[in-house]
Amino acid sequence: MTGHAPDLSHEQADLAAMLGAVVEGTKEHPRDEQPGDVAAVRRHLAELGVWTLGATTDGYQAGDELAAVAFACLARSWPALAWASVQAHAAVDVLGETEVSCAIQTGDTAVAVVDDTSSAVRLTVKDGRISGRIDRIDPAGERPYVVVLGQGRAWLLPPEALRFESVRRTGLQGALTVSAELIQPAVQADVVINSVDTDAARIRLKLGAAAVAAGIADAAAEAAIRYSSEREQFGAPLTALPSVRDALFSASGSAAMTLRQVLRPRDCTLWQATAVLDAACEQAIDTTARAVQAHGGYGYLTEYPVEGMLRDAVSLRASCDVVNTRRAAAADQAAFSTAGSGKDSS
């Protein structure tokens, strides 16, 4: 990672160096057109022990912090795989020690995790049967399992019960984004997982996604600094111009603040995790947009990575349904405040 990150422990620094070497040693960037390559990278990360690093049932905080480093490092080059890894972590925690969970941990099976309050989830339960569709998932794998988080319970939808259709999106190459429709109503008893701390899973998803956003911002700020240092105008590097230095400072500052926020221990409530994700996604979009501007007209060319980083940041925000989750968190806060006021007045 770059100097935007806070000081890492030896374990975290070793992990960052290992993931950097893995990315550098991979010949082809995982893309939608090569789903086999995406699966191979997923399995390779699992073999290295980082695909579900930190997934645990005992709430070990150090594991979460180390996992955040992994998410941010992967997101610098492979944001789609980083986001899929976040979902794999959450799925393993929800599923516990099951056959499906083991297949997820080895990277043999892809999984997507969605919140039933998301605007993309249109499922109904009637007479003990689940039907409907999910408009978007980003599993980074073909024919994934889908975990739907409810209130105190979750549903595990198997790939054979779903019809998948490709969905176009702005960025996140390698996410293999699809919609998932239940072919026929599933019997609730066959897919429901009761007594699950789904709020903990939601927090893990949000904080993990925030780490992915931080990694994208980190890579974009670094690319902007490197380009501006190498590009000359009027006989001097662009960094000699005060306006360029100010823009680079703003981009680097946003990346640094986001990384510091997501790479340090925290004890978040659900609405706080939502706030962290909201800020991280907005800062990632702002930082990547500044990086594009720092490149001038070249920033919009696919030969330079920053235009793709901007698209990745926009797609991540959409995938996490940040706008809808922000509204839900605001409503929860308002309800809590009203209830609190009522108690105080009595």
Image (cartoon, grey):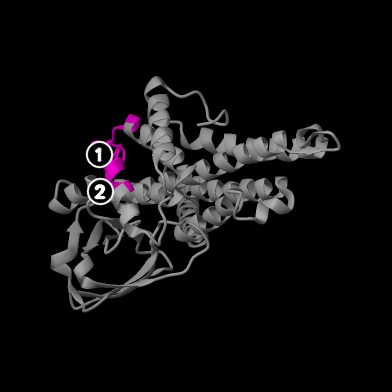
Residue 183 screen position, x and y as percent: 24, 78
Q: Is residue 128 above or below residue 278?
A: below
Residue 45 screen position, x and y as percent: 31, 41
Does residue 120 appear left or right of residue 101 in this picture?
Answer: right
Exactly how many numbered labels are in the figure?
2
Residue 242 screen position, x and y as percent: 82, 35
Q: Quadrant of residue 115?
A: bottom left
Query: Is the Cβ of the residue at disc 1 closer than 8 Å to that at disc 2?
Result: yes
Q: Quadrant of residue 59?
A: top left
Q: Quadrant of residue 222?
A: top right
Distance from disc 1 to disc 2, alpha carbons, whole Å, reads: 8 Å
- In the picture of the structure, the residue carrying the numbered disc 2 is 107
Tell me the kind of residue under disc 1. Glu
Could you classify mark 2 by the number of other residues whose Cα lies within 10 Å: few (under 14), some (14-19), or many (20 or more)? Answer: many
Instruction: Give the label on residue 47, or none.
Output: 1
Q: Which residues are magenta?
A: 41-62
Q: Looking at the image, which residue is at 19% across and 69% down?
A: 160
Residue 153 makes an appearance in the image:
yes
Question: Which of 153/185 is in front?
Answer: 185
Q: Is residue 287 above or below residue 59?
A: below
